Amino acid sequence: HCLEDASTCLPDSVALVCEECEEGYHLTNGFCEQISMCIMDECSVGAVCSDYNITHRLCICPDGTQGTAILNSGQAHLPCTTIDMCEEYGCHEHENCDFDETEINKRTCSCKAGTT
């Protein structure tokens, strides 16, 4: 992963010693090591970060929230937002919908006044 024309062999050395590395790698003691995208940029609070590839990270929002995204280095991860189950799924036409943010992935449908 050395940049071409940026590598040299030290005298009496079998290993290639790098002076510069390709994008997504950093130089450590003459060797190119992959940079963790999660160390470079974080995800929003509560989201789990994992390296997606050498230029992108994956921010995974917890269950019951939305905002999971694959982001380039330098792109900020927007905070995870609670999925409003009433907005997303609703109830039948003549029903009230109640959503409690503390109960993940649940909504309560109840009959409107005057209906059974």
Image (cartoon, grey):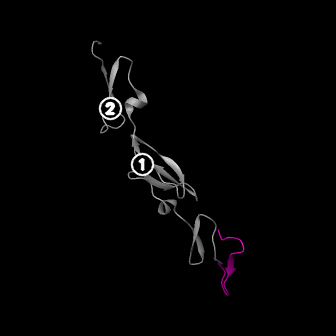
83, above or below 11, in the image = above
- Magenta stretch contains residue 13: yes
Element at badge 2?
loop
State the extent of the magenta-drawn residues as a range: 1-16
Q: Position of residue 4 (x, y in %)?
A: 71, 71
Q: Residues within 10 Å of mark 1 (few under 14, many from 20)?
A: some
Q: Residues within 10 Å of mark 2 (few under 14, many from 20)?
A: some
Determine the residue positioned at 68% across, 81% down. Answer: 9
Mark drawn on residue 99: 2
24, above or below 107, in the image = below
Image quadrant occupied by the N terminus: bottom right
Image quadrant occupied by the C terminus: top left
Q: Position of residue 26 (x, y in %)?
A: 57, 70
Residue 56 falls left or right of residue 4 = left
Element at badge 1?
loop
Q: Residue furthest left?
A: 113
Q: CA distance from mark 1 to mark 2?
A: 20 Å
Main structural element of the magenta stretch: helix, strand or loop?
loop
Determine the residue positioned at 30% across, 17% down. Answer: 112
Residue 94 falls left or right of residue 51 = left
**Mark 1 or mark 2: whose residue is earlier in sequence:** 1
Splitting the image into 4 quarters, where does residue 14 fall? Answer: bottom right
Mark drawn on residue 79: 1
Which amino acid, mark 1? Pro
Which amino acid, mark 2? Phe
Determine the residue positioned at 38% across, 53% down. Answer: 45
